[in-house]
Image (spheres, rainbow, N blue to C red):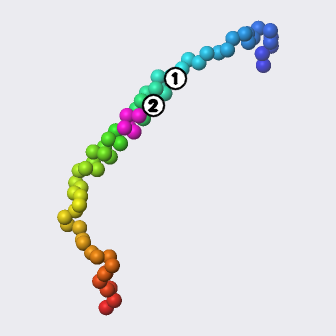
Amino acid sequence: MIEQQDQIDFSYVPQSRGLSKGVLVVLFTGLLVIFGIGGMSIGFAFWGHMWPSTHSMRLNLGKMPSTNH
């Protein structure tokens, strides 16, 4: 405990020093990773896909072939 209470100065409000450099680096790196993953998702969405597919099965779902033997 503080022995002499009259020496504590409560006449000012402490000011924040802001965010530390480590926190800013983590935040900036996180944002880069988020936008990088989003960009890769968009980029790879167009790679290797053909629409409409020319090799897909065309089945009339109303007249499915019977699987009973």
Q: Residue at x 27, y 48 (%)?
A: 44
| Residue stretch rendered in magenta on the structure | 31-35
- Dot 2 falls on a residue whose secondary structure is helix
Q: Position of residue 9 (x, y in %)?
A: 73, 10
Q: Compare residues 35 and 1 and report the one nearer the observer.
A: 35
Q: Compare residues 65 and 17 and report the one nearer the observer.
A: 65
**From the image, which quarter does the C terminus lie in?**
bottom left
Judging by the rendered image, the residue that carries numbered circle 1 is 19
> Tags 1 and 2 in contact by the CB under 8 Å rule?
yes
> Which picture quadrant has residue 52?
bottom left
Tell me which label, 1 or 2, sits earlier in the chain: 1
Residue 68 as seen in the image, left or right of residue 24: left
Question: Residue pushed farthest front?
Answer: 62
Q: Position of residue 41 (x, y in %)?
A: 32, 46
Question: Residue pushed farthest bottom?
Answer: 69
Judging by the rendered image, the residue that carries numbered circle 2 is 27
Query: Is residue 21 placed above or below 13 in the rendered structure?
Result: below
Specify the amino acid type for callout 2.
Leu
Q: Position of residue 32 (x, y in %)?
A: 37, 34
> Which picture quadrant has residue 58?
bottom left
Specify the amino acid type for callout 1.
Leu
Q: Residue at x 54, y 20 (%)?
A: 18
* Distance between mark 1 and mark 2 Cα atoms: 10 Å
Query: Is residue 65 placed above or below 37 in the rendered structure?
Result: below
Q: Compare residues 58 and 8 and report the one nearer the observer.
A: 58
**From the image, which quarter does the N terminus lie in?**
top right
Question: Residue pushed farthest left?
Answer: 54
Residue 18 as seen in the image, left or right of residue 36: right
- Dot 1 falls on a residue whose secondary structure is loop
Q: Position of residue 39 (x, y in %)?
A: 32, 41
